[in-house]
Amino acid sequence: MRELLAISPLEGRYSQSTRTLEAYFSEFALIRYRLLVEIEWYISLSAIEPQPLVPAWVKENADKLRAIYRHLTVEDAAVVKEIERTTNHDVKALEYFLKQKVAELNPELPTEMVHFACTSEDINNLAYALLLRAFVHSELEPKLKALVGHLGEIARRYKSLVMLSRTHGQPASPTTFGKEIAVFAYRLERQLKQLARQEYLGKLNGAVGNFNAHHFACPEVDWIAHSRAFVESLGLTWNPLTTQIESHDFLAELFDLFSRICTILIDLSQDMWGYISLGCLRQRVAEHEVGSSTMPHKVNPIDFENCEGNLGLARALFDHMARKLPVSRWQRDLSDSTVMRNLGVAFGYLMVALNALERGLSKVEVDEPKISREIEQEQSWEVVAEGIQTLMRRYGVARPYETLKELTRGREVSSETIRKFIDSMPLEPSAKEKLERLSPKTYAGLAQKLVEEFAPAPSGVQNREES
């Protein structure tokens, strides 16, 4: 019933692909990560030198406090939402909830030191940075690495399978199927390396970024040093200069990166769709599936089409967030808040797309005989014209390009046509011998070597440069 009544397909039709996102992007998850920040900040006040701002009990019983967010239940989160009905402010509701929990642990504790000197955005920016980092590292990176490994495996398996390439949709110089897949694996691997270097920034410096309240209430404390130590203790990179909000530049960097990943995967999906259309790839048939409501023979490349469509939605959201989030009027406006709440939507469409791509790749088989027949057919010999005219240049033959253009452009070119042309050329025997060995199938350049040296290794196998 939940899936049937859902407004968004992410929680309806595609819910099996997005269920894991609930641990990071649901309202419950946001409450939990906010609580984490609030509690860790409260604990940090017990370590301030020379005079802690909360009793030593807090430091000595830190795990009891941490249990509040570690063991948070949906019922607890519902209490927070009920308080919010009165406050009409989500972080203030969380503060009141936490004060109750702290008082239950020890009535002697100063509950008013919960949320001490904080603005809501001190809590929010850290919570979002933490949940984003956790999702990317725990869910998304492993999925993308597995995809790169799968593509690397395909690339190496078919590194020597020569096929006609197509530039502008027309037959062009031969390549290998493995090398063309390796291109995508390499592009994705490069983005993953950038993702591994991605910083997740955070700040805790008050209402306009100046520690106004902190310094006014407790001028004896080195708040700059304490803020830095606190943010870094969460595993984040400290941002010292902000307005009320963390500037979101790192979010723009992250979303631009995922936008590029979406673009690469759209390119891959379209190429796979095209190879299926050409017959270079076959789709395994599932006995009980239907390809068309009227045409019984159809086996459609729906997984790659689904992937492409959902990647477009994800990319549109990533692009908008990357452009919008770093822009805020003066010291703060609220237009970023509603956008941030859609992080899970953008990543949801990406996860749906990745799952569709995995399904698509698992269903296709390379039709080696078909690819070989195409490269060996008599009508494909015009694709060696590039090699012939280039060799002619090396040996000083006049007008090589123009000569081959007259011979091949817009015409059917057979092996006999090429052989007769080679025989007529004024070349030394060694050059002619080289040309006589030339065919579309032997004219794949260094495609195999490129795969062997630069294609990402299959999953679980180290690349040479890494080992």
Image: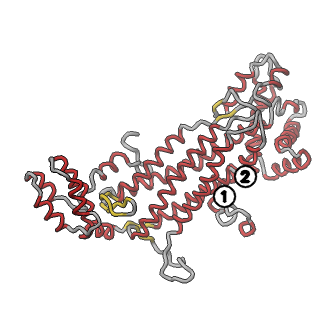
Rendered residue at 15%/47% (across/down)? 396
Rendered residue at 41%/65% (across/down)? 275
Q: Which residue is mark 1?
A: 19
Q: Which residue is mark 2?
A: 26
Q: In the rendered structure, are the residues bearing label 2 and label 1 in contact, judged by CB atoms less than 8 Å apart?
A: no
Image quarter of the C terminus: top left
Q: Position of residue 24 (x, y in %)?
A: 68, 49
Q: Secondary structure at mark 2?
A: loop
Which sits in the foreground, 60 or 162?
A: 162
- Colour convention: secondary structure
Q: Position of residue 10 (x, y in %)?
A: 67, 61
Q: Is residue 40 left or right of residue 258?
A: right
Rendered residue at 18%/46% (across/down)? 394
Q: Secondary structure at mark 1?
A: helix
Rendered residue at 36%/57% (across/down)? 178
As drawn, the label of residue 401 is none
The alpha-carbon separation of the residues under discs 2 and 1 comes to 10 Å
Residue 43 shows up from this direction: yes
Disc 2 marks which amino acid?
Ser
Q: Position of residue 203 (x, y in %)?
A: 71, 31
Dividing the picture into quarters, in which one does residue 331 lie?
A: top right
Q: Position of residue 438 (x, y in %)?
A: 19, 59
Disc 1 marks which amino acid?
Arg
Q: Is residue 194 left or right of residue 236?
A: left
Residue extending furthest left?
A: 429
2 or 1: tag closer to the N-terminus: 1
The answer to whether residue 349 is above or below residue 37 is: below
Q: Residues within 10 Å of mark 1 (few under 14, many from 20)?
A: few
